[in-house]
Image (spheres, rainbow, N blue to C red):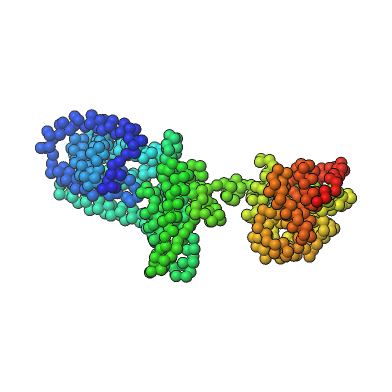
């Protein structure tokens, strides 16, 4: 009963517009049908037995119309079309409309249509039959009615009449569907056009054959049921195969193909809602990936795993709303298409409900299995306007949730390392770093220029410039200066990081050699990523470059972060040990922001600790930051390590660091990062700053 109510309902916000179309259609049908129907009683006595046989078959056949799976009821195929069109050709409009009305009444009762819907359907047929009759009248003599065999002109007239019938009927249906369910009219018109042309066109063009048989003998009319039944069975088998192709064979849920179709149908509907500013204009795609499912398969077998997936599908289906679509994409991945949401909060609430439904153990053969998962959420239109984009962004959000240990996450561009913008940026970076590659001719034009800037590091107590930090800069031809953090994020997730590190090492070592030739002897520090430290390749590369340019190993220092150290301590330690044997110094960067243990500090061959700028910037105003900086300095000095403070921007901070016993400072208080040639000029002008002896405690 609930399904019947849904079929007969019209969304309240569309009711006025929808019925503003329905009632004029009904009125127009009444006008064009009134005169012929008034004359119908006078025709009944003269109608032959063939008419009554056709009329009876039309009503009986429509008692069981064929509705293709997955389509709206408006797409149902009614066999009465064949009989009523034949009646129109043989005996005129009034008998055809009368029989069609009787057939619609029976099918409406069978399908539980409301009165307004049944009347509207009758009106559509009446207009379509009247349009076909008008085409026939324009041709003069009625086709197939004159004595003698049919002529080619008769066939042409019937085809034109069938086309008029189809245009009126299909046109009114698609307009009504669009007004009732939303979306754009043309996509709605195109959506079912092929199916309707094939099914309805076949029934209409079978009518002349049926009429010719009726002229020979009324006894031949029932024989048309055989080809009609054959077409019906073939169409049903085809539809069943199509339906099976849209279902997951294990769970019976929709599959990826069906989900794609639903998204394609819902997007224009929600686009119209967004245009109107409706509160329920959002569409959400939720992607669920189960946790620990592989363990179940490995420990208990695939049969138990399959039963678990079926139960998960049942729980999700029982949790979501009636209009939402649940799909299994394969393996342990499920998707939910949630329609008519008010916004992100609704999508999050639905995700929380699904996670809660899966939190209860699933009992299989008496064994309780814990099921959990992570859900990624992408919303239309802010996160994508098509299936592929929404799916990819939901996937990014799902892995973001897993990475953070959260049950769900909404897509965020910051978490997307493979967004189109970043992929484009990565391609440009590869071009500029690999001039010998396939796109070498485009490197200089499209990739822009990679350069190194250098920021001085100054001994606090003497004011002597003892070193520089090499900082990467990329001037993109379209984007301008690319943010260094964005640059590293783009490169670190790919093999381009290896090319970038090689470029940085080459440039810095070569620059040290050039400075030495000019009489400038400085230590240069450069940053390396986690990926660089997982193999010994960087140690071999640095050793080769130092040897080639004749630069002492002690003039080069690598800075590693606490995060890189803790990611894989064993492999990182092996690489650092190789570098230490060469003579390259190692600094622990951003100290205080990670989770380094004292054990790692003791084991690592460190020469220097850099205090993170977040603490240094605030130490002049924040007592806690100042206490943290002093503690780091005391710890490093106790371990015999040099201490460098980065982010020194004013004199007060500089003096506080001096009083705390910090060895080296780096920041805008001394100088901003600058290109190599400007650094030489700056050094020539630089006059050491001496803060004087630290106060006695």
How far from the left and from the top, in percent, is residue 184? Answer: 41, 38
How far from the left and from the top, in percent, is residue 387? Answer: 47, 48
Examine the rendering and report whether any part of residue 112 can be seen.
yes
Which residue sits at x=28%, y=54%? 233
Taking depth in this image into account, of 628 and 358 the one nearest to the observer is: 628
Taking depth in this image into account, of 534 and 390 the one nearest to the observer is: 534
Taking depth in this image into account, of 160 and 581 the one nearest to the observer is: 581
- Identify whether 586 is placed above or below 463: below
How far from the left and from the top, in percent, is residue 318? Answer: 37, 54
Taking depth in this image into account, of 657 and 529 the one nearest to the observer is: 657
Extreme-left residue of the structure: 45
Which residue sits at x=61%, y=49%? 423
User: Total label count?
Assistant: 0
How far from the left and from the top, in percent, is residue 557? Answer: 78, 56
Task: Give the quadrant of residue 129.
Answer: top left
- Seen in the image, is 598 located left or right of residue 679? left
Which residue sits at x=35%, y=35%? 14
- Seen in the image, is 607 located left or right of residue 312? right
- Seen in the image, is 304 located left or right of residue 127? right
Which residue sits at x=67%, y=50%? 488
Extreme-front residue of the structure: 697
Examine the rendering and report whether any part of residue 613 can be seen.
no
- Identify whether 239 is placed above or below 193: below
């Amino acid at each position: 009963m609930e399904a019947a109510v849904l079929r007969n309902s019209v969304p309240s916000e569309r009711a006025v517009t929808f019925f503003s179309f329905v009632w004029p259609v009904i009125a127009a049908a009444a006008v064009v049908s009134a005169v012929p129907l008034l004359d119908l009683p006078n025709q009944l006595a003269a109608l032959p037995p063939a008419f009554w046989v056709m009329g009876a078959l039309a009503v009986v056949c429509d008692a069981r119309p064929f509705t293709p799976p997955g389509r709206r009821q408006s797409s149902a195929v009614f066999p009465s079309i064949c009989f009523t069109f034949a009646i129109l050709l043989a005996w005129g409009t009034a008998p055809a409309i009368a029989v069609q009305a009787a057939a619609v009444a029976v099918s409406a009762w069978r399908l539980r249509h409301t009165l307004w819907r049944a009347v509207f359907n009758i009106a559509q047929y009446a207009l379509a039959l009247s349009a076909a009759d008008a085409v026939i009248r324009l041709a003069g003599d009625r086709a197939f009615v004159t004595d003698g065999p049919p002529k080619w002109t008769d066939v042409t007239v019937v085809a034109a009449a069938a086309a008029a019938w189809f245009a009126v009927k299909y046109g009114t249906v698609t307009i009504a569907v669009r007004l009732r369910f939303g979306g754009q009219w043309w996509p709605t018109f195109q959506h079912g056009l092929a199916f309707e042309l094939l099914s309805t066109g076949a029934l209409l063009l079978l009518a002349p054959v049926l009429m010719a048989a009726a002229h020979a003998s009324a006894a031949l009319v029932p024989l048309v049921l055989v080809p009609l039944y054959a077409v019906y069975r073939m169409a049903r088998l085809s539809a069943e195969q199509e339906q099976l192709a849209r279902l997951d064979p294990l769970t019976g849920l929709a599959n990826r193909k069906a989900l794609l179709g639903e998204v394609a149908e819902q997007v224009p509907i929600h686009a119209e809602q967004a245009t109107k500013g409706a509160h329920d204009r959002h569409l959400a795609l939720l992607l669920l990936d189960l946790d620990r499912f592989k363990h179940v398969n490995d420990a208990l077998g695939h049969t138990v795993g399959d039963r678990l997936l079926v139960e998960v599908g049942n729980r999700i289906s029982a949790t979501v709303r009636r209009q939402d679509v649940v799909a299994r994409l394969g393996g342990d991945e499920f998707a939910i298409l949630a329609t008519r949401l008010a916004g992100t909060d609704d999508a999050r609430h639905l995700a929380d409900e699904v996670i809660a439904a899966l939190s209860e153990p699933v009992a299989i053969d008496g064994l309780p299995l814990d099921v959990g998962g992570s859900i990624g959420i992408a919303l239309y239109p802010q996160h994508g306007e098509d299936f592929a984009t929404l799916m990819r962004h939901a996937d990014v959000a799902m892995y973001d949730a897993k990475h953070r240990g959260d049950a769900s996450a909404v897509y965020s561009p910051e978490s997307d390392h493979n967004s189109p913008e970043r992929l484009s940026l990565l391609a440009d970076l590869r071009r500029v770093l690999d001039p010998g590659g396939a796109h070498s001719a485009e490197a200089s034009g499209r990739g822009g220029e990679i350069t190194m800037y250098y920021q001085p590091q100054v001994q606090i107590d003497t004011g002597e410039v003892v070193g520089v930090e090499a900082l990467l800069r990329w001037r993109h031809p379209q984007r301008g200066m690319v943010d260094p953090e964005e640059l590293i994020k783009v490169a670190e997730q790919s093999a381009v990081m290896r090319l970038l590190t090689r470029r940085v090492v080459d440039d810095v070592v070569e620059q040290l050699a050039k400075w030495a030739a000019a009489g400038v002897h400085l230590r240069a520090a450069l940053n390396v990523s986690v990926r660089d430290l997982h193999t010994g390749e960087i140690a071999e590369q640095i050793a080769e470059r130092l040897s080639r340019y004749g630069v002492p190993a002690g003039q080069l220092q690598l800075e590693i972060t606490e995060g890189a150290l803790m990611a894989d301590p064993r492999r990182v330690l092996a690489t650092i040990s190789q570098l230490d044997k060469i003579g390259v110094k190692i600094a622990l960067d951003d100290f205080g922001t990670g989770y380094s243990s004292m054990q790692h500090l003791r084991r690592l061959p460190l020469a220097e600790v850099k205090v993170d700028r977040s603490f240094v910037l605030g130490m002049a105003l924040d007592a806690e930051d100042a206490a943290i900086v002093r503690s780091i300095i005391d710890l490093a000095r106790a371990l015999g390590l040099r201490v460098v403070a980065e982010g020194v921007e004013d004199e007060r901070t500089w003096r506080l660091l001096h009083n705390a016993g910090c060895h080296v400072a780096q920041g805008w208080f001394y100088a901003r990062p600058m290109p190599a040639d400007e650094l030489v000029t700056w050094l020539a002008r630089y006059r050491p700053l001496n803060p004087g002896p630290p106060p006695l405690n």
